[in-house]
Image: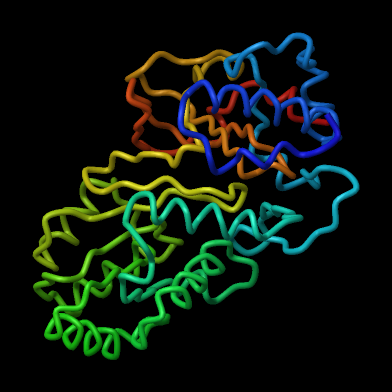
């Protein structure tokens, strides 16, 4: 398959349509993405051996650190790069059609929360703003623009200004979304605990070495107590994806129709995992049409029969199996 089958990407409405398009994209990426094709060939998984989604190989996410995971003959419009400690190797996601990313995050947000234009969007993402190439900053910056609210904007460490803005928005009964990295939201919660009635808080995860890591339940408990809210929203995304999953509370995430999460056996990276059992997180992101839509992450979690999932932690390097398959 030489042409990307992207015309159906954002019109998926059934599991059968998702399965059919997944197989079409697998064939397209096997044919046109040399890194993914080489990996599949090492597993002896050509299109003739793949008849359903369960047969599709998932590329270890570490390939994005060492390879240009991209369909050949495509021009690069933008490169997203992951954060990393000094001297560490970061992931790079080469994007050939940034408009697909626009459509993906806009349609996903609308799917879960309604139009961006309905919100004043406040972004507290200091660790991401302090570096180049963040896909999260790119997305939220566009969200701020699309919201068209005059008070929408970014905040670095200026908690005083953010607090004043929140107080005024609450007074005006303005529907507000405060989206922030975990450590900055905790800093804000400790400095300015405030009762919020018209503001919803969304955490994107990540202490970024600024604070001790917390399990999501503990993080949410502190934020709910400080801001007197019943739920904390969460966003689950990563540099290597062009789609996001969202949680409306309790740390249970759901995917937009063109994205799906499954788990793999922690002892056998090529084997699937039953519902409700902890395993490595595999992601199908059909918006990744010109890179790789089938990614084995380093996250641990559980997937439930209704397609929702939760994230429980990460593998450390000693836990990752099958590393001989990663050396292309």
Q: Is residue 215 left or right of residue 77?
A: left
Q: Is residue 126 left or right of residue 78?
A: left
Q: Nearer the viewer, residue 46 or 52?
A: 52
Compared to residue 45, the image places residue 323 above or below, namely below
Compared to residue 96, the image places residue 34 above or below, namely above
Q: Residue at x 41, y 56 (%)?
A: 109
Compared to residue 179, the image places residue 304 above or below, namely above
Q: Quadrant of the C terminus?
A: top right
Q: Residue at x 49, y 27 (%)?
A: 280
Q: Quadrant of the N terminus?
A: top right
Q: Is residue 26 left or right of residue 328?
A: left
Q: Quadrant of residue 252?
A: top left
- Residue found at the far right of this picture: 73
Q: Nearer the viewer, residue 210 or 33?
A: 33
Compared to residue 31, the image places residue 99 above or below, namely below
Q: Quadrant of residue 194?
A: bottom left
Q: Nearer the viewer, residue 150 or 226?
A: 150
Q: Residue at x 54, y 50 (%)?
A: 238
Pinpoint residue 178: horizontal percent, then vertical percent: 30, 70
Pinpoint residue 185: horizontal percent, then vertical percent: 29, 68
Q: Residue at x 31, y 46 (%)?
A: 247
């Amino acid at each position: 398959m030489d042409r990307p089958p992207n015309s159906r990407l954002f019109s998926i409405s059934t599991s059968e349509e998702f399965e059919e398009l997944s197989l079409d994209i697998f064939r397209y990426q096997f044919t046109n993405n040399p890194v993914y094709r080489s990996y599949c060939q090492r597993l002896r998984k050509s299109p003739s051996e793949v008849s359903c989604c369960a047969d599709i190989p998932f590329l270890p996410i570490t390939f994005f650190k060492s390879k240009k995971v991209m369909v050949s003959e495509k021009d690069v419009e933008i490169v997203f790069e992951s954060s990393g400690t000094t001297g560490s190797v970061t992931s790079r996601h080469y994007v050939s059609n940034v408009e697909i990313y626009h459509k993906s995050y806009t349609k996903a947000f609308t799917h879960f929360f309604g139009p961006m234009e309905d919100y004043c969007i406040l972004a507290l993402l200091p660790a991401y703003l302090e570096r180049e190439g963040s896909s999260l900053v790119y997305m939220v910056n566009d969200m701020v623009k699309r919201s068209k609210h005059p008070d929408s904007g970014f905040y670095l460490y200026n908690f005083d200004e953010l607090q004043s803005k929140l107080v005024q928005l609450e007074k005006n009964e303005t529907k507000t979304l405060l989206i922030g990295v975990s450590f900055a939201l905790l800093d804000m919660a400790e400095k300015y605990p405030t009762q919020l009635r018209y503001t919803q808080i969304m955490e994107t995860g990540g202490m970024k070495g600024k604070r001790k890591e917390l399990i999501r339940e503990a993080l949410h408990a502190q934020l709910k107590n400080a801001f007197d809210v019943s739920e904390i929203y969460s966003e689950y995304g990563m540099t290597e994806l062009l789609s996001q999953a969202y949680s409306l509370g309790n740390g249970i995430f759901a995917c937009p129709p063109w994205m799906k999460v499954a788990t793999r056996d922690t002892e056998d990276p090529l084997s699937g995992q039953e519902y409700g059992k902890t395993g490595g997180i595999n992601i199908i992101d059909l918006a990744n049409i010109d890179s790789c839509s089938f990614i084995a992450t380093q996250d641990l979690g559980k997937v439930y029969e209704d397609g929702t999932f939760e994230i429980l932690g990460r593998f450390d390097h000693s836990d990752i199996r099958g590393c001989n398959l990663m050396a292309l």
